[in-house]
Image (cartoon, rainbow, N blue to C red):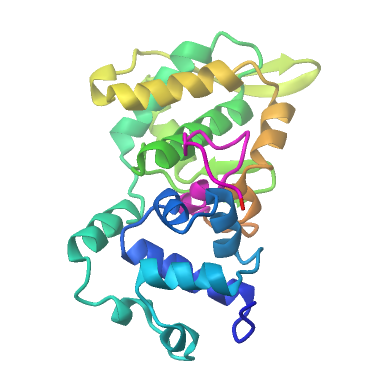
Amino acid sequence: MITKLSKKQIGQRITELRKIKGLSQEDLASSVKISRSSLAQIELGNRGIDILEFQKLSMKLEFSLDEFMSENFNANQHVEGKNESKSKEHNERISEPTLQVEKFKNILLYILERCAGKPNVGETVLYKLLYFSDFNYYELHEEHLTGAKYRKLPFGPVPQKLDTIISQMIDKKQLQRVKTEYHGYQQTRLLPLEKPDLTRLKASEKEVIDRVIEQMSDWSAAAISDYSHKDMPWLASKDGEEINYELAFYREAPFSVRNYGEENEE
């Protein structure tokens, strides 16, 4: 076992090198003959790494043991000038999400058009449908769907600036907010007053949203909140902080929506 660095430090350095070289977890795991889930655990610092695995990783990621173990190791300097196009491509993938307001509004209207008639779909369920649409799309396509940022709040992930957007849509007569009662509890619901512009959505985007709606739109607020609290992006984030989209790549079943293929277990 490698002992000069903690498992967390080793995982962080491997993650940095993999990302800079533009490799997915699937690519790297396959090349060194371990499962993607094993690599994910190594990168998270939850699993140790033996010397044979380390040697395979060093060959694929092109680092020496001395370089990797040095106190001032810098992944960016190590690969400077190498794999420039891949690095650029990866940097585009992990760029800071930028909210696409009009797209967000149309996705909100589309989800409501599909679900507003269901008595269980209050604001709590709606926010989770938006969250899973955004994070499932990112895991599948490595691109942002709405670009909304989510924070880890007590009742689950909530998109930032949502209240402002909803207020704007209510003012423009695009939405109506109503108070209802569901199973003896007060519930806030949003009703669409206009149809979404589906020309703003790609087929792949609509497909992901439709799958989320089909899977979860009949769940109660308690059920979908509990499910979201077991999703890796939520679990790995700190209370009150922004949830990193990159954490979607550390999901395991049943949350992972990407087909990583048959992986070789050790």
Considering every residue shown, the one lying at the far top of the view is 117
Please state the horizontal and vertical placement of residue 185, each as a whole percent of the image: 77, 22
Please state the horizontal and vertical placement of residue 245, each as a whole percent of the image: 46, 50
Q: Residue at x 26, y 63 (%)?
A: 87
Is the residue 189 above or below the residue 53 in the image? Answer: above
Taking depth in this image into account, of 52 and 183 the one nearest to the observer is 52
By secondary structure, the bulk of the magenta-drawn segment is best described as loop
Is the residue 97 above or below the residue 76 in the image? Answer: above
Q: Residue at x 60, y 50 (%)?
A: 152
Residue 49 within the magenta-colored segment of the rendering: no
How many labels were placed on the picture? 0
Relative horizontal placement of residue 96, taking residue 112 as reference (left or right): left
Considering every residue shown, the one lying at the far right of the view is 184
Please state the horizontal and vertical placement of residue 165, each as a whole percent of the image: 41, 36
Residue 250 within the magenta-colored segment of the rendering: yes
- Location of the N terminus (image quadrant): bottom right
Q: Residue at x 40, y 18 (%)?
A: 110
Q: What stretch of residues is rendered in magenta?
A: 243-265
Q: Is residue 176 visible?
A: no
Please state the horizontal and vertical placement of residue 73, each as a whole percent of the image: 42, 86
Relative horizontal placement of residue 46, taking residue 204 as reference (left or right): right
Taking depth in this image into account, of 55 and 211 the one nearest to the observer is 55
Is the residue 205 above or below the residue 178 in the image? Answer: below
Q: Is residue 15 visible?
A: yes
Relative horizontal placement of residue 258, taking residue 252 as reference (left or right): left
Taking depth in this image into account, of 238 and 178 the one nearest to the observer is 238
Q: Residue at x 38, y 26 (%)?
A: 107
